[in-house]
Amino acid sequence: MKFLYNLTVFLISLVLPIIALFNKKLQLFIDGRKQTFLKIQALKNEETVWFHVASLGEFEQARPIIEELKSSFTKYKILVTFFSPSGYEVRKNYDLADVVCYLPLDSVSNAEKFVKNINIKMAIFVKYEFWPNFLNELSKNQIPTILVSGIFREQQLFFQFYGGFMRNSLKAFHHFFLQDENSKKLLKSIDFKNSSVVGDTRFDRVSRILNQDNSIDFINEFKNNTYTLVAGSTWREDEELLVNYINNSTSKDEKFIIAPHNINKEAIATLRKSILTKTVLFSEKEGKNLADFDVIIIDTIGILTKIYASVDVAYVGGGLKTGLHNILEPATFGIPVVIGNKFDKFKEAVDLVNLKGCITIRNQNEFSSIFTKLKKEEDFRKSTGNINKKYIQEHLGASQKIINYLKKQF
């Protein structure tokens, strides 16, 4: 199994540069990794805490811990590595990290070179990032390693009879901080008992958002005290339902904010062209009377969280096909959240659907029906949003439990 894994990584390293010639996202993936070993030279003689995250969602899970470590243990440098371009491109200038870069492909040589070139005092992996060669190298060098906000599923390779190679890589972890009891039981079934259930650090992160200034002047101008629906992190399949709802709406007292996941010019132009009512782009808003428009398309990144604070209801994209995006951010503001029906891999979505704070849809009829109801029935809208807010408040505290553990290690 180990040989097949390493062979696969090697073949991927040969094929990806060719495929990347025809895919801009993959080109970022390739080009960004060319800079990694140069960037980490800045940490060669520094005591460093290394955080590895897959993408933006996992970064948000690491963020409360990074913030606490940065304030409590100032002598340590912070390294954050990303696997995905979508996470790296948004947070590559994160000011609390001393170095932000891509994780090299998980080859034996890359892992050896990476660990050798950094004085790593502790490695912190987030949620479900398991790269066996990197983990084995950390273990070989006796570097303390923990998993935070971890979640395991029975279908994963660790729990299959042929998954010995991956199970062995888990030995690198000194402790597993988990989101749920099921993950603890699964680890125990393969003789890993060094775990504790503390919850998801993202709850702490999104709760802190409430304490910041979330007002955005241009959003207030656009809304003009009108009922507003935001569709965040949308993909094409989400936008088709939303656009059809907008185009068939007879209501004059409803506005729409669309923040697509893909903000390249062609995709934005296609989306805009499909909308029949008055639409403006974020990039074109200057000098316009925004109150005159019915739809604003956010063709930039980094402001969606604050937008959630200003609207009445939210649709979060990805749940129909591509992969559900963050529902905790809108939930923390106490507004109803609507998602697609493919959400079973996201514990918070499963919980909130069961609690009826989050509502799922499968098709156009269900999409239009629920948003019509949410608009017309204010009591229903408020009670649904309150379920979400209460759920967030009841799940705080994971970050502090992890910090308490870390303080004993440093």
Image: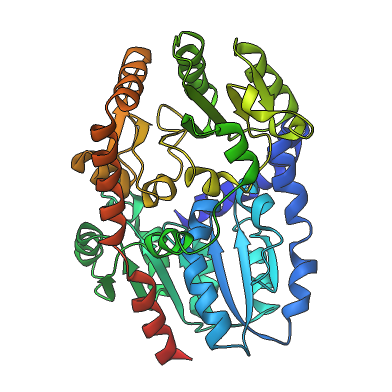
| Residue name at image x 37 percent, y 77 percent | 400
Residue 158 position by quadrant: bottom left
Q: Residue at x 73, y 55 (%)?
A: 33
As rendered, which of 23 and 105 lies closer to the eye? 23
Q: Residue furthest front?
A: 225
List x then y, in percent, for residue 218. Answer: 65, 40
Counting labels gives 0
Picture layout, residue 279 above or below residue 247: below
Viewer-closest of 334 and 32: 334
Residue 68 appears at what percent x and percent y? 50, 79
Q: 160 or 101, which lies in front? A: 101
Q: Is residue 266 visible?
A: yes
Q: Residue at x 55, y 59 (%)?
A: 213
Q: Residue 354 location, x and y as percent?
A: 19, 41
The color scheme shown is rainbow
When the figure is inspected, residue 240 is found, relative to residue 265, above or below; the finding is above
Q: x and y percent of residue 15 in the render? A: 69, 39
Left or right: 286, with 128 as reference point: right
Query: Which residue is depicted at the point 63% across and 16% down?
Result: 278
- For the question of whether residue 357 can be seen, the reply is no
